[in-house]
Amino acid sequence: MKLAVIEGDGIGREVIPVAVKVLDAFGLEFEKVPLELGYTQWERTGTAISSDDLEIIKGCDAVLFGAVTTVPDPNCKSVLLTIRKELDLYANVRPVKPLPCIIGVTGRNDFDFIIVRENTEGLYSGIEEIGSDISWTKRVVTRRSSERIAEYACKLAKKRKNKLTIVHKSNVLKSDKLFLDVCRQTASANSVEYEDMLVDSMAYNLMMHPERYDIVVTTNLFGDILSDMCAALVGSLGLVPSANIGDKYAFFEPVHGSAPDIAGKGIANPLAAILSVKMLLEWMGEPRSQVIDEAITHVLQKKIITPDLGGTASTIEVGNAVAEYVRKNI
Ligand code: ATP
Ligand code: MG
């Protein structure tokens, strides 16, 4: 197993080393390939991600990624979009699950669902024209991409409650009719129970009745917005992990960005990055990944928490406590 480790910028440089320590505590055979990408790299070399970097990444099985600060040059290739495209990471997966002792904005902790977002097309097709009087972006929905994201969502549903919610806006956006039809057909073919919801209604329902959902599948922009909104259900941006999955490669990252306002202070919450390591272990089929949940429960109960959760512990203190628990309990 070869793992590219990209700390990136800002708090990425603080949370990723801590997450790697937790990964090391499992004592698995990993070849780690550190890569310098992002804003700092752009300042030094003029490129945030080079073709050599891409070749090195393609020689790995998976990527653990921190965060990169957006480069102000519009001609500079986006690190995230480039990797997503080159590795064909078509499924963006975000589990939304409460953590012990932490209560999010709605005050509830009875939900446990996964947002599966189509990651390659929709309104993020990159096909657009910018003018002074009219600008437009093409929203692309293809049968192939809709089918593979629906297949992926159904596979997850089968492992859980066998329940799929298809989120769309096909009453207004006719391109979504194809997405909806393909998702329905795929769910039927896989004997997965399904319902569909308009995205606006879904936003409301996710806040009011988050316990109703199991697997939520949707197009690129809707998934982007809904999944950030759902970080509020959990309680902090510092707690939510994500995975970008393709048929060959997978890429794991905390949902938060590089948070320049707190970077360098040693107070960033590393739990989102640590939970991203858990998703990596699950993707590898490692049966002991569950120990990470126990370790996190342990640190939260002992109030070894960073300032965003009202504590005084540092990034490293939280990371060490999690890693030590894992070491002792696997
Ligand atoms: P970027 O441009 O890289 O996305 P940003 O300024 O948008 O950076 P985010 O990382 O998206 O910052 O986070 C938004 C806010 O949430 C930050 O101001 C930060 O204080 C807080 N935050 C994000 N991640 C964490 C974390 N891991 N621990 C504590 N606070 C965090
Ligand atoms: Mg941000």
Image (tube, rainbow, N blue to C red):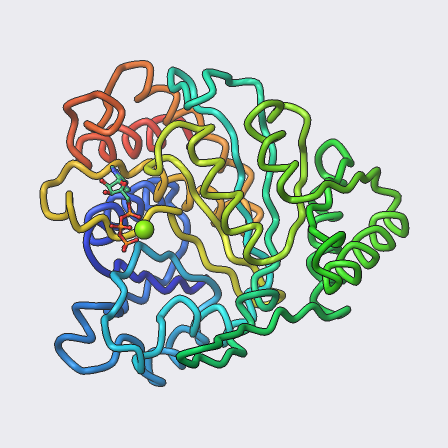
Q: Nearer the viewer, residue 48 or 326?
A: 48
116 is higher (above) or lower (below) than 42: above
Q: How many marks?
A: 0
| Residue at the image point whose x is 83% and y is 41% from the top | 192
Image quadrant containing the C terminus: top left
In the rendered structure, the answer to whether residue 221 lies left or right of residue 187 reads left
Asked whether, in this view, residue 85 is left or right of residue 218, the answer is left
Q: Most extreme residue toward the left, as rendered? A: 265
Q: Position of residue 53 (x, y in %)?
A: 33, 78
Left or right of 250: which side holds 82?
left
Q: Can you tell which quarter of the image residue 195 is in?
A: top right
Residue at 81%, 59% (x, y): give it.
182
Compared to 317, does 301 lie above or below?
A: above
Q: Position of residue 86 (x, y in %)?
A: 49, 76
Which of 320 and 119 lies nearest the eye of the viewer? 119
Name the residue at the bottom extreme: 51
Q: Nearer the viewer, residue 127 or 118?
A: 127
At x 45%, y 16%, the residue is 107
Q: Residue furthest front?
A: 133
Quarter-of-image position of residue 91: bottom right
Q: Residue 307: where, in percent of width, then height? A: 19, 27
Residue 132 % position (x, y): 40, 79
| Image position of 182 with respect to 317: above or below | below
Residue at 21% across, 68% down: 39
Q: Nearer the viewer, residue 7 or 199?
A: 199
Q: Is residue 261 above or below residue 67?
A: above
Residue 9 found in image quarter? bottom left
